[in-house]
Amino acid sequence: MIEFLTDLASFPFLRNALLAGVLASVACGVMGSYVVARRITYIAGAISHSVLGGMGAARYCQVVLGWSWFTSLLGALAAALASALVIGLVSLRSKGREDTVIGAVWAIGMAAGIMFIFRTPGYNEDLMSYLFGNILMVTGRDLWLMAGLDLLIVGLAALFYNKFLAVCFDGEFALLRGVNVEGYYLLLLGLTALTVVLVLSVVGIVMVIALLTLPAATAGYFSRRLLGMMGLSVLFSVLFTTGGLALSYGPNLPTGATIILLAGGVYLCAAFFSQRVKARRRAGG
Amino acid sequence: MSGSTKAGRAVIELDGVTFSYNGAPVLEDITLSVGEHDFLSIVGPNGGGKTTILKLVLGLVKPAKGRVSVFGLPPEKARRRIGYMPQATALDKLFPVSVMDVVLMGRLGAGARFGFYTRADAQAAREALEKVGLAAERKRPFAELSGGEHQRVLIARALVSGPDLLLLDEPTANVDIAAETEFYRFLRDLSETMTIVLVTHDLGFVSQHVKTVACVNRRLLCHPTCDITGSMISEIYGSHVHMVQHDHGPGKGGPHD
């Protein structure tokens, strides 16, 4: 811990990592609360895993086809938004098996990613950082991009707060009040996709849903309104990312995994104590 | 006393409406007219198509045959004038919202606004909550309320837009008999200023309080103005169901006439 604090002053990469965690936490807290409240964790999971397809395709295009502009971040954004659109349209329009489509998008995205990475010459060290993230590699340019995405996500979430809330709570009623329910639901999934991409660099594809849902679910034990849940969830998320970074730095542990274990531990404690409090209340009253 | 309910012009008109879901007929040849300030109850067994009638009136589903008009308009165009209370069981009881949050949703679409609700919206929501006797509970989480309170919150949400037509789906589920009487009085007062259509499978409520009844089990078995008889009830609900004798005296009308 002390090593982390002294090095923080001297190493810019550590400051970048700290800032990346805070920036990711803002979007994570806001959109994660929607994901938890609307119970679409598995949609967020499918979006995040399908991103591997986009990142793999981008890497392939860069190395094999020489499209240097097609960065893996662009690939990730394209894949995340496309998956959100597909899943959103299926869940709105078709009366078919939504969970099957979610599973299919999840697996097909990953398979495509693995295929592209396998066919790309060179070392495959990228694969590990895609899957598990590498917060210590975040550059200053990444931070500006993250800040921009944050601004977009939080701005739209605030602007349409009432509508998102109504669409999530009771879509049929919102429709009757003249709200464009399909449009807002797709926008909500789109913003979730952007958040997924934002969080990727911190914890990687595999653990995105954990950082998206654990802070919000923990906040849910303390706040019973969505707005309060969002605020608390941002705080928890900052605590987890910063704490995870600090804890992992000295003993040289993987940062993403440390963050998630910290978040999971706090969530389980909150769940346990909330059960205890409920049981005591029941026994008392 | 019955028979004079269509004083005003028609608010709802269903003309030969047929609706089927996945090939199975749900409603067949329904013709029904509801006038201004009528207070109509639609009764029938579960799965008999009662809720579907409300959804047709709201324009959420389209009839396969026949015509639906509300305030002389296609249903979708009339939605702003309708307040709708769905069955409370359809909602996620753990959703993180307060009572006030839920009622405010009824104010959506009052204008093309962004961001948060205005002070006028909050005022209207408080008044609606006062009407249903839940003003003191407005800051409580929706999740903590009882089943009956959930329904009252949803009625407040339906009222907050100042509708001319109020549609209620099973509003007396989870409500005890004493509260039912009070609730009926509340609706009767409301019907001075708006048209009310209520859907219920609760014959106890209907036989005690309600005068105009339409019985629906796929077909319209009885028009709003006729009496409910024993034979009709067995026709709707099947012969193994019998009327429960009430202490409030026999006959239609109930104690509030």
Image (cartoon, coloured by chain):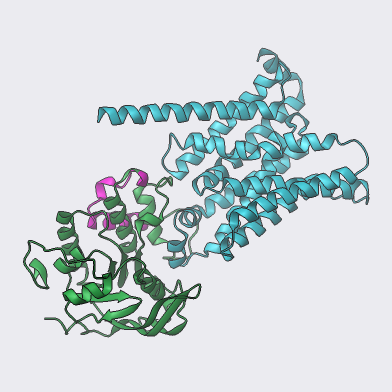
Q: Is residue B189 left or right of residue B214?
A: left
The picture places residue A139, in percent across and down from the top left corner, at 78, 34
Q: Is residue B123 left or right of residue A182?
A: left
Label count reads: 0
Q: Where residue A158 appears, x then y in whole percent?
A: 53, 50
Q: Position of residue A173 (x, y in %)?
A: 42, 62
Magenta-span inclusion, residue B125? yes
Chain A colour?
cyan
Report if residue A71 is visible in the image: no
Looking at the rendered image, the quarter that the N terminus of chain A falls into is top right
Q: Image point 71% across, 40% down: which residue?
A: A205
Q: Nearer the viewer, residue B4 or A3?
A: B4
Report the span colored magenta: B118-143
Which of these two is toward me, A248 or B21?
B21
Which chain is rendered green in the image?
B
Q: Residue at x 58, y 54 (%)?
A: A188
- The quarter of the picture where residue B72 lies is bottom left
Instruction: Give coordinates of residue A54: x percent, y percent.
Output: 78, 49
Does residue A75 lie above or below B157 as drawn?
above
Name the residue nearer the viewer: B101 or B15: B15
Observer able to see residue A96: yes
The answer to which quarter of the image holds residue B172 is bottom left
